[in-house]
Image: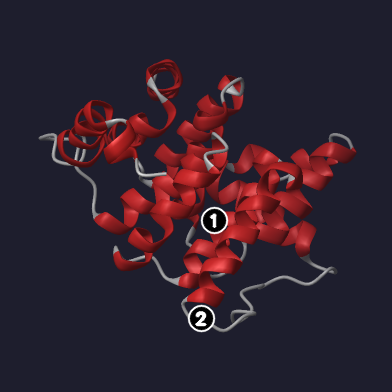
Amino acid sequence: MNYYETDPEFMERFEHFAYDEVVHEEGQQLEEPVRYLAILATLMGCQGKEEFKRVLPKALKGGLTPVMIKEIVYQGVDYLGIGRVLPFLDAVNQMFEEQGIALPLEGQATTAMEDRLEKGAQAQVKIFGEGMREAWKNGHINRWLAANCFGDYYTRKGLDLKQRELITFCFLAAQGGCEPQLTAHAKGNMNLGNDKEFLIKVVSQCLPYIGYPRSLNAITCINKAAE
């Protein structure tokens, strides 16, 4: 579909806003790789598959590596579920194959089945503080959270903890209805150095992809976390 022919007035205003005004807003700019990290995670969170496919080549040119892109998709399963992530994994694999990027990529796992719980809990402590060291004992869901979410994914190479908390924030902000978790992960971001001003920049750069209501909700959560 050629939207420039079918919807020229819309395209004029949308492209000016999303690709010029937002990107270059004084005081709200992000480095290209960071911006694309946030946008890809945001598009997964809001189920924007078609826009995700359009942004992927720009993200590769903008500084994201194939490994980084795959790590965004893998981690999305923890916050969105496989039902919502599988189409994005298919899209990435298809684009990589079209561009001659050999699959599978080099493995990034740093845990084994025997130590994933222990190392996952350690990652939780690094992000949220000492109070999380024994949190996995509070029922099987908390144990899964430590071993699977953090032990299987947060411990992987390809993205550091700051980048992983950033994309988690974007998954949660974009899907909506997760404000308690969004506030907690806003705080986790701040604990790692992604401060309030940085997170507001992230929301600003992602606003064209998720709209105003979820963006304003995200800023409310950031402010709560900062308090």
Q: Nearer the viewer, mark 1 or mark 2?
A: 2
Residue furthest front in the image: 5
Figure check: 128 above or below 157:
above
Numbered circles on residues, count: 2
> Which image quadrant is residue 129 in?
top right
Q: Nearer the viewer, residue 100 or 76?
A: 100
Classed neighbour count for the residue bearing mark 1: other residues with Cα under 10 Å, few (<14), some (14–19), many (≥20): many
- Quadrant in the picture for the N terminus: top left
- Pick out the residue farthest to the right: 140
Seen at 15% across and 34% down, the residue is 21
Residue 154 seen from this side: no
Residue position for label 2: 101
Query: Which residue was labeled with disc 1?
Result: 72
> Which residue is outermost to the left?
26
Q: Is residue 176 left or right of residue 222?
A: right
- Going 50% across and 29% down the picture, which residue do you hit? 173
Rendered position, 125 above or below 60? above
Which part of the image, by quadrant, shows the C terminus?
top left
Q: Residue at x 50, y 55 (%)?
A: 161
Residue 46: in sight, yes or no? yes
CA distance separating discs 1 and 2: 17 Å
Q: Residue at x 23, y 37 (%)?
A: 15
Between 36 and 16, the one lying in front of the other is 16
Q: Which of the 4 image quarters holds residue 143? A: top right
User: Where residue 172 sits: x, y (%)?
Assistant: 55, 33
- Judge left or right: residue 28 versus residue 163: left
Instruction: Give 215 or 184, whichever is nearer the viewer.
Output: 215
SS of the residue at dot 2?
loop
